[in-house]
Amino acid sequence: MPNLTDLSLLEAASALRSGDVSSMELTEACLERIEALEPQLHAFLAQTPDLAISQAKAADKRLQEWRKKPEEPLPLTHGIPVAIKDVLCLEGIPTTCGSRILEDFRPPYSATSVARLIDNGVVVLGKTNTDEFAMGSSTENSAYGTTHNPWDLDRVPGGSSGGSAAAVAARMCFSALGTDTGGSVRQPASFCGITGLKTSYGRVSRYGLIAYGSSLDTVGALTRSAADLLPLFTAMAGHDPLDSTCMPDPVPEIDLDDCNLTGVRIGVPKEYLIEGIQDEVETAVRSAVKVLEELGAEIQEVSLPHTDLALPVYYLIAPAEASANLARYDAVRFGPRLKSEKLWDQYLRTRGELFGPEVKRRIMLGTYALSAGYYDAYYGQAQKVRTLIKDDFETVFKDVDLIACPVAPTTAFRIGEHGDDPLAMYLEDIFTLPANLAGVPGMAFPVGFDRNDLPIGMQLNAPHLGEMALFKAVHAYQTQTDCHLRKPDL
Ligand code: GLN
């Protein structure tokens, strides 16, 4: 048996079924790996070893019973150690969103996505680091220190789900949950050489996800391959009466063994392979598209003409919605209170001292864009352009089944590189934002390495609720290639 943490999620699931390993052994192997690597990586904001051990015990007990009646259904996630981005509530466990304003906040309930995974037998190792309130592309905006990229400790893991991506890439867990408002699952997956799914808007319940941009936020997951991701997605997705934005549509079942790309039409948007993109990213994406073609896909060039407007539109809509969502941190209802004699001063002091600079920048921008007199010119106008971006996708999806494009213009950048330049940081999101504005799903997966041996990612997008087509295509690619099997030297 190889090192237990090197098993894929599916290999671990089958070893659990056969009794070759126990959930406790997997859990202990992950906890040891976390202990050894956490000082270098800082992927976690809270570790939950006691919870993990009790869940592993329960999982092993259930496995023993199951082995007597193997005809009973048992989810593939059963007994598998995972981590959770610290913007998703886990009952009784500190949930900070990487912010001082929620320091020591312990939610009285769990997010539906988390509760469904727990019902499906997962073992929760802890909460992972994130940019404050998921605002950022590097995890450097966490109030609790940055996470380091396992491929090069001087570089960022991407963000905002950087803790989750680093933990999966470093084999600290088999999978981790992330959230994607403008790219925060796909971009860190790309920077860390793993597979990440941004789900369709409304596909996975957001009950218990601490809101950032409500018309954009989605819950997703990061793993080492599409095949490993599927059982998490099917466990989490589907209607939730607790979230009125969660779609009632059933989640189709698919058989990954039967993934033939013959006849699948894949569009490559000409607006994405633009000047300024790192050569090696472009080359790797083009060769991955060739591999998909060799697997039977029909490739054609397509156009998403409003692509260059996605960045300004997103950076109006997301801060506007964030400013409304973050108004609730008023020093009265959640988190610590910095007392002052006057109530107004208490608000000012608490919000002024406990929110970080990027969050305050977004609240200022967003409040301005929503203010009377400017609403129509900024937020209203941005919503209209958003419709054009969404229409671009709808038009292209009449002709193709999937869209292939890069995840980010570069591979992982150095910690501090965009430190005093928010615009340079926002530009990192240029290829991921359109899918959020259009509400469509996207899967990022590794397709190569640059001259510094840093992973290069590519993404496929599908029509709304078309996740299964992404699983099939990425799995087909991963059965023919081995980028997703490489792991960082740590
Ligand atoms: N980087 C983008 C932002 O800062 C996206 C973040 C996200 O998807 N949560 O808003």
Image (cartoon, rainbow, N blue to C red):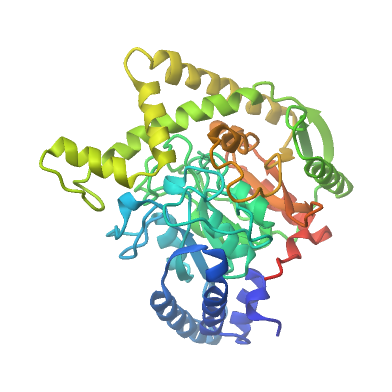
> Is residue 42 shown left or right of residue 396?
left
Up-down relation of residue 400 to residue 197 (above or below):
above
Image-quadrant location for residue 166? bottom right
Image-quadrant location for residue 8? bottom right
Name which residue lies at 31% across and 15% down.
Answer: 372
Q: Is residue 254 visible?
A: no
Name which residue lies at 44% across and 76% down.
Answer: 52
Residue extending farthest to the left is 341
Up-down relation of residue 297 to residue 151 (above or below):
above
155 or 207, nearer to the observer:
155
- Residue 435: x, y in percent? 60, 36
- Residue 472: x, y in percent? 71, 52
Name which residue lies at 51% across and 41% down.
Answer: 181
Quarter of the image with the C terminus in it: bottom right
- Residue 134: x, y in percent? 46, 46
Name which residue lies at 57% across and 42% down.
Answer: 183
Q: Is residue 114 visible?
A: yes
Quarter of the image with the N terminus in it: bottom right
347 or 84, nearer to the observer:
347
Up-down relation of residue 38 to residue 367 (above or below):
below
Total residue callouts: 0
Up-down relation of residue 481 to residue 444 (above or below):
below
- Residue 422: x, y in percent? 53, 35
> Is residue 53 shown left or right of residue 163?
left
201 or 385, nearer to the observer:
385
